[in-house]
Image (spheres, coloured by chain):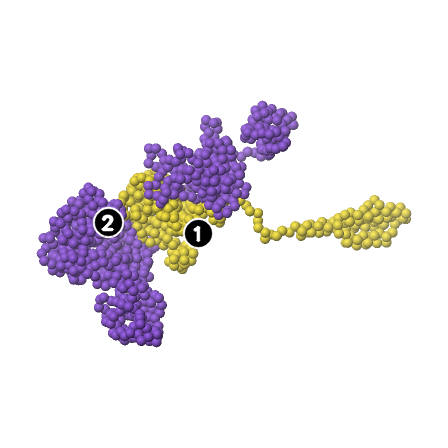
Chain colours: A purple, B yellow
Amino acid sequence: MKAPLNWLKDFVDINVGIKEYVNAMTMSGSKVEGVEDMGEGIEKVVVGKILEMEPHPNADRLKVCKVDAGSEVVQVVTGAPNVRTGDLIPLALVGAKLPGGEIKASRLRGVESYGMMCSMEELNLTRDYLPDAPEDGVYVFAEDIKLGADIREALHLDKVIEFEITSNRPDCLSIYGLARESSVALGVPLKKPEIRVKEEGSGNAGDYVSIEIENPELCPRYSARIVTDIKVGPSPYWMQHRLAAAGMRPINNIVDITNYVMLELGQPMHAFDFSCITGSKIIVRTAREGEVIKTLDGQERKLDTNMLVIADAERPVGVAGVMGGENSEITDNTKVLLLESANFNGASIRVTSKKLGIRSEASLRFEKGLDPELTVKALDRCAELIELLGAGRVVRGIVDCNMTKKRQDTIKLDVDRINALLGTDLPAEKMIAIFRALEFEVDPDTMLMKIPSFRSDIENIADLSEEVARFYDYNNIKPSLLSGKESMRGKRSYKQRMEDAIRNTMCACGMNEAYTFSFTSPKVFDNINLPQDHPLRRTVVISNPLGEDYSIMRTTTLPDMLRVLAINYSRKVETARLFELSYVYHPVDGKELPDQKSVLTLGMYGEGCDFYELKGVVEELMAAMGIADYEFKPEKEDPSFHPGRTASLIIGTPDSKSQKAGVLGEVHPEVAEKTECPERTYAAMFDVSLLIDASTLARKFKPLPKFPAVPRDIAVVVRDEVYVADLIKAISKAAGDILEDVSLFDVYKGSQVPEGMKSTAFALTFRSPDRTLKDEEVNKAMERILKSLEHQFGARLR
Amino acid sequence: MKQQLESIQKEALKKLETITDIRELEDFRVAYLGKKGELTSILKGMGALPPEERPLIGQLANEVRNALEAGIAATRDRLIRAAREEKIRQETLDVTMPGRARKLGRKHPITIVLDEIKDIFLGMGYEIAEGPEVELDYYNFEALNIPKNHPARDTQDTFYITEEVLLRTHTSPVQIRYMKSHKPPIRIICPGRVYRSDTVDATHSPIFHQVEGLVVDRGITMGDLIGTLEVFAKGIFGEDTKIRLRPHHFNFTEPSAEVDVSCWGCGGTGCRICKGEGWVEILGAGMVHPNVLREGGVDPDVYSGFAFGLGIDRIAMGKFGIDDMRLLFENDIRFLRQF
């Protein structure tokens, strides 16, 4: 809400500096977004009158003028094509300051010039502010203005304060409402000018029109006045300028007056050409099936049966509270008008304006719920202005159809509870003073207060507390720290501790944390080779997305990880190692909300990155989470991954109890190509809740060995397709208890072994916890191992 | 013979001083003290001396031997020390050359800030609660005193899945979920991802992160809220940080406030970060609205509470001086590795 300062001053004396005023308003809840000083940078520019105009002796296009600047007559050379003798114009005197620079005495083609006549642009104004300014040339006043007057006053160049008005305070969407807040914030009285209407039109309003409300819950009150002998024309400068400064374009006196009253009092008004109201009847009703109306903006609007319209005996003449109809618009020929001032149900107006796509100044006010007492006051103010401007003759009386339900209008001022909620110790008198300033009527004996009709936001003790607090100043409340309350133990849940462990382990393994969007494009599934009938293609769909690229909630994080890797790759980042701990969202049949699953995603390419590097990270994670019971199995079925370089992580044994917790491997070359990742890109995804279920924070100490270890190596030749994991399992089983550790230290393929075979070498460590092992024991174990490998895998000792 | 011994000692000790390596020293030892060494051969000639001179010369010879042995030991020390010093001199490194790169990863700046926030509140006895991101309109709006078609919904442009299901626009729905399943006293923070229909630019993102705080107990005051936020602000922005509350309106709190912290860029004197104001808005807060308490199954005549909500992304940007929000979601390694 833009409020010109001088308009506010009609209702409240603001005798402090602008900075202090802005601070007082912001700190009491009317946040100031900014202050625009329209006259900033303009000095020594006055209203001048052209007394004489002679051609320039040395230039065809220039004229030499004698201009009366009030206190002196100066000679000015101008090139403006539009000025004539007798015109009143803005004259920048020598030494004047304009946004474009300072004015100096000069000599133009040999003739002295002591000033400059100004155009709209030179005064830093726009056509919204000066609708009658010429396209090209000097601004010429159409109204008679005192010679020598400062242009800032002549053109009402004001300081305009922009307030942020919260949705609970529609009363502050008005100059008067803001003046009321200002009066309390500054501790000065609110001026309440009396509205006087002469009512010189013939007859009574009730003789002209009748009003019927069919849906009182959607329109509790409809009030109207009749004005005859309408003279449509421009409104005076002061009104045009105030409207423009507040952000509304001046149109004509009638429209301007209704807008002026809306801005001043917060009550939207509408003026109908009464000759267009068939049957002299206003009916407030919902639209009929298939009804259509052309609104003031020239658009044909289809109405539905929930929309409230203002109709005459035959047809809608306006969409209630949103926009009037073209069929009853004020024109230059309008002789009699009907002024509407009504109260509508906020939610209904909001739904209609959203459906029609019209958010007008009127609808924005109505949808917040207005004071039903305001309709008559606004009509009177309108009538007063019409008479003041001589725009018509106001007919006696108001036709007022008031079906407002009585609402809660008293509340107890419970001083103790307010102090208890705020943590303050304010005396009753102080609170009473605040509420009286806010126009509550307070009975100091019962402490009952009458809530003003414009404060429908006040319902309970919390609301009262806020009123007290904001004028006491929140920052005067003494800070405390739950003093006297039971102390509580802060803690992370087990799940949260595990998530921290995952992040810490990832970082320790050189993985950098990524954050990606949780919505994505449905096209990403094609990029990762998911078949058309794949279950991950069933997604939660956003009905009003920012675009197709952000239209579904993701069911897999792989495309996002690949996109991040591709971005880095395209920017010539040589090595990227990333992880993300985030969610995927799977729709669940028969449930409103999807299953939100936590996923750990890994991705890497570049120096040192291969399958075993990735697997090493995963093994480290298993250790950090205390998961011992797991294994990796070759994964050939996942369409996004290289079938020969991918494993699934299986948690839990035996097989009947085991679960696949995720997949890790080299990204399928086709997927890498489609996603613009390097050829050797590695990725992994794990179901975090499965990992957490299998995890433990318990650790049990094993005594350090007391007896010496016996190291042995064994190298066997097996067929290529034999898995090392199976060899290790066989070795462990055959060796028995005395085998402490077995690890692979070499795999060899080449000229020394036959085609299709490989040599695998293992380092074995034998040890007993209670004795020194004898050579024979170890030898026997080695024999058992070899025999088992020969038997199971056809292995040969190398 | 006595003179002979004395001159050997004198000559030998002098020679020792000139020895510069360990092999030379060994040759020296052999030359004097070896089986065929000079001193040894002199001693062998002792038999020719008169018996009364023998003890005297014998003693002298022992003294000379001891002197030489001590001299050799000292020289050995000297040589070893010199050799070590030489080695040290030769193996001096250029310590200004870069260290060998470690490959530790980094946490995302949002995680870093969130962890700091968690630590502050865990220390004050809070638990961490969570809730779903795809949420019911009921929890996100209606239970928070924002009925359907209320204009307050305008301030939170919402992504809808269906009429009743949406992407949560704030972490506040967790308040209701938690109150419905836990009895007071309640002290929680609820971090999480939230969604608003804003197009992506340097200062807006349709996805960002919030932390909600909720305290419900008997006799909770607005003073408690202010004291808590002070602890938080000092914890995140430094001990000198001040906070300022401005009255505002949220449907789910009353009284409501927008909370500013003294600018971290200038400390309050005005700079580019705070647009000359000296204050930067970082969160919204207030006393839990009675309707919200009631909706959560808490009797507002017995209990009161406060709540606050803050944007983590903005705080991370402020703390680290990140000038473009898009960087947070792009995940350029060169960005991530700065934190």
**Residue at coordinates 89% horizontally, 46% vertically from top-left?**
B47
> In the figure, is residue B212 to the left or right of A618?
left
Q: Nearer the viewer, residue B183 or A155?
A: A155
Numbered disc 1: what chain? B
Question: Which quarter of the figure is the N terminus of chain A placed in?
Answer: bottom left
Determine whether A332 is above or below A657 in the image: below
Q: Which residue is mark 1?
A: B322
Q: Residue at x 45, y 44 (%)?
A: A564
Callout 2 amino acid: Gln
**Residue denoted by label 2:** A299
List x then y, in percent, for residue A698.
49, 35
Give the left or right position of residue A715, taking residue B276 as reference. right
User: Is A719 above or below relative to A625?
Assistant: above
Describe the element under mark 2 as helix, strand or loop. Answer: loop
Give residue A555's position: percent from left, percent from top: 40, 37
Q: CA distance from mark 1 to mark 2?
A: 46 Å
Q: Is the residue marked by circle 1 packed among few (<14), some (14-19), or many (20+) residues within 10 Å?
A: some
Callout 1: SS: loop
The part of the image, by quadrant, that contains residue A704 is top right
Residue B130 seen in this snapshot: no
Sort mark 2 into few (<14), some (14-19) or many (20+) by Cα contacts within 10 Å. few
Which amino acid type corresponds to the residue marked 1 in the rendered image? Ile
Q: Residue at x 31, y 53 (%)?
A: B247
